[in-house]
Image (cartoon, rainbow, N blue to C red):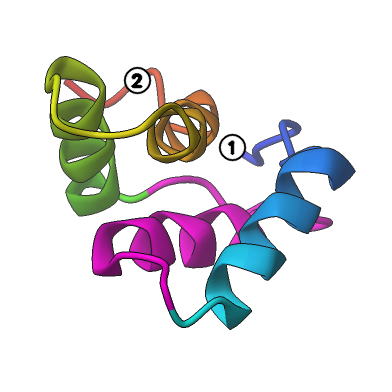
Amino acid sequence: MTNKKQSSSQMASLASSILTDITSSQIQKTLAGSVLSQTGTSHQTGALMESIASSVLQSDKYSDVTKSLAASVLSQSNRARK
């Protein structure tokens, strides 16, 4: 089944700026890469990225920007996966 959901241009822009910012954390860059890979394509989030993004959202130690990226990644996930 193809994924009809795609990252928004606003999230893609944020992700792009994070990838080029040397002060961005590794987790931000990982999530940003996933967001960009889902922009303009039918790619969906893999199980590992779902797990990473879920952990970010459940933790208090991450910034709002990092959590926004995680939420975007999870919005592309495969709902059929358990």
Residue 37 part of the magenta segment? yes
Give the residue at x 55% y 32%: 72
- Above or below for 18 versus 51: below
Q: Position of residue 18 (x, y in %)?
A: 57, 65
Q: Nearer the viewer, residue 67 or 40?
A: 67
Label 2–label 1 contact, CB within 8 A: yes
Q: Earlier in the sequence, mark 2 or mark 1?
A: 1
Q: Position of residue 56 (x, y in %)?
A: 21, 32
81 horizontally vs 79: left or right: left
Give the amino acid at mark 1: Met
Q: Which mark is residue 82?
A: none
Give the residue at x 75% y 33%: 4
Q: Position of residue 9 (x, y in %)?
A: 87, 45
What range is drawn magenta here?
Answer: 23-45
Instruction: Identify the residue position indicated by label 1 in the image.
Output: 1
Q: Quadrant of residue 15?
A: bottom right
